[in-house]
Amino acid sequence: MHVDLDHPLDAATARQRLADQGFAVLTPAALAALAGVAPAALDALPPYWNDLAPDRHLRDGGHYRHRRHGCFVQRLAPAALEAVPHRAHWQPTTYNALHGGLERWFEPLDPALPREPAWAPLLSALGGLFAAVRPPADGRWSIEAHPFRIDTEGGVGRPTPEGAHRDGVDFVAVVFVGRRGVRGGETRVFEAGGPLGVRFTLERPWTALLLDDPRVVHESTPIQPEDAAAKGRRDTLVLTYRAGGFQAPG
């Protein structure tokens, strides 16, 4: 398994790397080029992370995670991206032993976020790349968008309290938005059925980790403040793409 955080991958190379090893990492320049947007358009998004709502479903008793949630359907031909009515986020215990089996209602996305010029091109371009690796049978992706902020107000923040996991979807994009005043937060990706894995730290805003979810497991290690007197934080945008509809009970 190979990761290169410094050299941009074009769409064809990223697609091939996903097919070969189950994941790929896009540099900020590569992500902007894939989406066909200027880097400045991506740089307009981070202020939305300052108004995320507390995650009130954490079963470990923590208060370190803030998030919102939105759902979209991407039709590949003819190309279209549509928001769908707000719904609960649900995963089976097979994929999330800590929070699986719960209908978790999170606050919806700020309505202005999907209207940002970079939003639809970003989601659509990633969906197109994923479809080139393994197209959905019905020609559409069910997409869930999760802006996350993990902070260190309680001393430790856990980006993945469920540990190494899969999400129960076809593909995942973990888009790194930024971090401040923290250490830790190492990203780890391992073969779902084998011993190979890689470890690295996302540090440059708009670096994107792309995952073929059935083939790999992933996690991020806890973060701690660099200065005990100051709260740190780590921001990401997690996008999941699933064929056959959204995950739901029953």
Image (cartoon, rainbow, N blue to C red):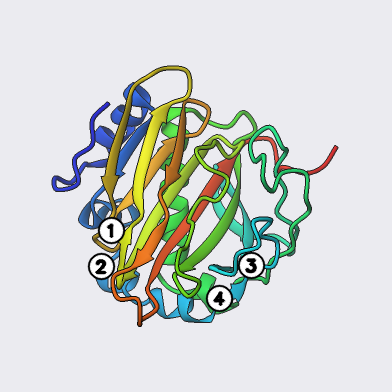
Front label number (3 vs 4): 3
Q: At numbered mark 2, what does the secondary structure look like: helix, strand or loop?
A: helix
Q: Amino acid at mark 4?
A: Leu
Q: Earlier in the sequence, mark 3 or mark 1?
A: 1
Judging by the rendered image, the residue that carries numbered circle 4 is: 52
Residue assigned mark 1: 32
Question: Which label's residue is closer to the chain start, 2 or 4?
Answer: 2
User: In the displayed structure, would residue 189 be above or below residue 191?
Assistant: below
Q: Quadrant of residue 55?
A: bottom right
Q: Please state, as top left, top right, bottom left or bottom right, where the N terminus lies in the image.
A: top left
Label placed on residue 55: 3
Q: Amino acid at mark 2?
A: Pro
Q: Is residue 245 above or below residue 62?
A: above
> Which callout, 1 or 2, points at the residue further toward the start of the chain?
1
For the residues labelled 3 and 2, the Cα–Cα distance comes to 30 Å
What residue sits 64% from the left and 56% below the top?
A: 60
Q: CA gap, disc 3 to disc 4?
A: 9 Å
Pointer 1 and pointer 2: residues touching (CB < 8 Å)?
yes
Residue at which label 2 appears? 39
Q: Amino acid at mark 3?
A: Asp
Q: Between disc 4 and disc 1, whose residue precedes?
A: 1
Q: Is residue 142 left or right of residue 28?
A: right
Q: Pointer 2 and pointer 4: residues touching (CB < 8 Å)?
A: no
Identify the secondary structure beneath mark 1. Answer: helix
As measured in the structure, the alpha-carbon distance from the residue carrying label 1 to the one carrying label 2 is 6 Å
- Point out residue 167 in the picture as x, y percentages from the top left corner: 58, 40
